[in-house]
Image (cartoon, grey):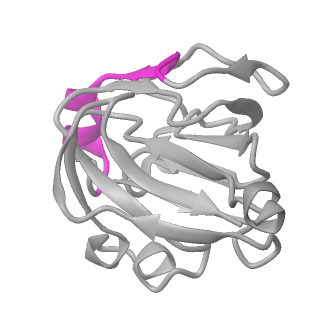
Amino acid sequence: MFKKLFNKSKETHFYAPVNGKIVSLEDVPDPVFSQKMMGEGIAIIPSEGKVVAPVNGEIIQVAPTKHAIGILAEDGSEILIHFGLETVALNGEGFDVHVNPGDQVKVGQPLMDVRLNVIQEKAKDTITPIVITNGNQINKQYDFTEPKEGKAGETLIFSSRD
């Protein structure tokens, strides 16, 4: 009886970082993401450009081109939010980042503002993969939501557990 009480699996929840339609990672029109070369995850087709923290954690990366942010979640998962496809070529145009590596963030805290019209006009796609980049290195199981509309900082997109 005590074993059950003390061996409860801790679950961590990850929320949509942006408003939009939640889709499977396999739906991303880029094999690096759809074939999960960077890791398991999910994607969102954004309806606006406000990006918020999907989980409590620490910013571990802000791409020099501002199109991607990495977060180390409290459970040890490393999450990459990659806004759009081929957005690295924009060299920061359309992105206003509000965080730096080392910053502590909470769910719903603003990370960056994206001028969606610039991304729609100049990048391949606005679809935004959210990838667990160290999933093969830590002992977690991830459960992903079904496709649906998501609200930034509120809609659960996946959970991790030991």
Q: How many marks?
A: 0
Quarter occupied by the C terminus: bottom right
- Name which quarter of the figure residue 31 lies in: bottom left
Where is residue 40 shown, x and y percent of the image?
Answer: 53, 73
Where is residue 148 shown, x and y percent of the image?
Answer: 15, 54
Residue 52 visible at all: yes
Q: Using the image, determine if residue 162 lies above or below residue 82.
A: below
Name the residue rendered at 38%, 74% in the picture. 30
Quarter occupied by the N terminus: bottom right
Q: Is residue 118 magenta?
A: yes
Residue lying at the far front in this picture: please name it.
1
What is the span of residues highlighted in magenta in the rendered image? 108-124
Residue 127 visible at all: no
Q: Using the image, determine if residue 26 lies above or below residue 69.
A: below
User: Depth check: 92 or 161 in front?
Assistant: 161
User: Depth check: 12 or 58 in front?
Assistant: 12
Where is residue 122 shown, x and y percent of the image?
Answer: 28, 43
Name the residue rendered at 79%, 52% in the picture. 76
Name the residue rendered at 50%, 77% in the picture. 32
User: Depth check: 132 or 48 in front?
Assistant: 132
On the picture, is 115 further left or further right than 4? left
- Name which quarter of the figure residue 27 lies in: bottom left
Q: Is residue 87 magenta?
A: no
On the picture, is 52 further left or further right than 155? right
Name the residue rendered at 44%, 47% in the picture. 87
Where is residue 48 shown, x and y percent of the image?
Answer: 22, 28
- Name which quarter of the figure residue 5 lies in: bottom right
